[in-house]
Image (cartoon, rainbow, N blue to C red):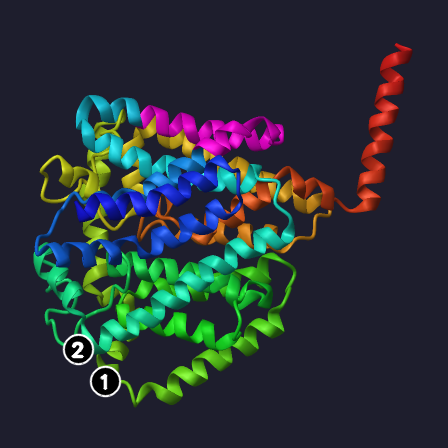
Amino acid sequence: MLELTVFLFMVVPGFILAVRGSSYLLDYTTLVFVFNREIRRLVDYSNHQFNAFSLISLTPLAMLALLFVSFVGRFDTLHVRAKQIFVMLLAAIGYGFVIGIAKNGAACIYQGAQYLSTIGLMGYAAVTPADEKTADRWLRTAALAGILAAAYGWYQYFTIPDWDAFWVRQVGFVNYLGGSLEPTKMWVFSTFAERGTCAIYMGLVAIPMLVSKRWRVALGWPEVILILSCIFITFSRIGIVVAVVGVVLFPLLNGGKNFGQILIVVALAVGVLFAFADKIPGVDRMVKRFEILLHVQDDGSFQGRVFIAQATWPATLQNPVGFGIGSSGMAARINGAANGLVTDNGWLEIMTSLGLPGFALFACALVLLWRYFSLLRRLGVQDDYLGLARTFLIASLVFNWASNFVIEFSVMWIAMGRSLSPLMFEKIDPQIQEILESESAEATSLASNQ
């Protein structure tokens, strides 16, 4: 009864926001995503019983479904090229869904909802007629959620709350989280479903905070340091690598924009982390964990991903139709499989789930997405969201080898959606706009004379 009550308490406000057409629906969805798992753990602990299929875990999908419905309702407002991108993405997922229903049953519905929800998030940001202030609020809400989760992560690191320890034992994550349920020895997952999800969210949300002060909340760079430090205590290296690569890519892809500011903030963050490093229990384990990045070929995790790729490629080529959505990860475990078909490799997971036809559609959508961003650049659009979207797209292409970014909620989708908004065309360089209008008038005149 408590679980159902909490579920309704979390979902009903989102439904009200959706009915009212409020842009705060995206802010609320972000908060639900970041904190729903911790709320679930508190409820399970109160009930003295772990529920593997808790309704509370579905609250982010419920909120994202509301975003998707809003997106579909305003789909016609998009530019024709943006429509093509979304149609291709939906076609790819539709193909994988058809195969998945036949092969994987209910698991297909769960993972299919994950794919559609992130596209709905990007679509919602694209079709909502939000001004700059509202769009900035979306990213600052994501940053605020990350700051609160990072603060809780440090609390978890030093205390291991009973409800978190209860959950770790129930799901058999003791070894996965460092092998010991003791303060400063357990790897942190904060308010998220697991430490990898936590690190990826923190790494991606840190990028806009690092590249521009407009996306920080109140205290400025100390917030960034808090978020980056939390990634270290997750012991998940991908979060730090994603943040670093994103910070390097942003000025490279945007004509050196904010390079000096970014360099100063990064230097401050690194300096503070090193200054306090010797005062943090367990720091030697962190250093050992992260220094392996300097010789990644000797890393067991890296070798494991190579082995997975070698084992999965033949299966993919031998079954070009695909295994369908629901054949991997948590979705596969719903069907009783101990492990998904593919883990720790986003591209292979997408390829096996969507099959070669679906993957081809997905890849074409990404190419069109990059070309769309390039078109805006050629039209003289100068916008921080466009720069951020280009950065996220390139970073995700690289790091999707380590995790399936496509089904992860993140600020990446908000920035990309904002860049697909028809509002971007209002920022075309006036001189280029004048040339385009002149060419259009000339073409119309020639057509009428003929």
Q: Earlier in the sequence, mark 1 or mark 2?
A: 2
Describe residue 435's horizontal placement relative to residue 133 as left or right: right
Residue at (55% x, 50% y) in the render: 390
Residue 402: image location, x then y, percent: 31, 53
Is residue 148 positioned above or below 253 on the image? below
Residue at (80% x, 42% y) in the render: 432
Residue 319: image location, x then y, percent: 22, 27
Q: Mark 2 highlights which residue?
A: 183
Q: Give the magenta range.
A: 69-96
Residue at (13% x, 59% y) in the render: 45
Q: Mark 1 highlights which residue?
A: 281
Q: Main secondary structure of the magenta part?
A: helix
Q: Image quadrant of residue 7? A: top left
Badge 1 amino acid: Pro
Cα separation between marks 1 and 2: 9 Å
Describe residue 444's horizontal placement relative to residue 224 as left or right: right
Furthest-top residue in this view: 450
Is residue 257 positioned above or below 71 on the image? below
Res. 248 visible in picture: no
Q: Image quadrant of residue 48? A: bottom left
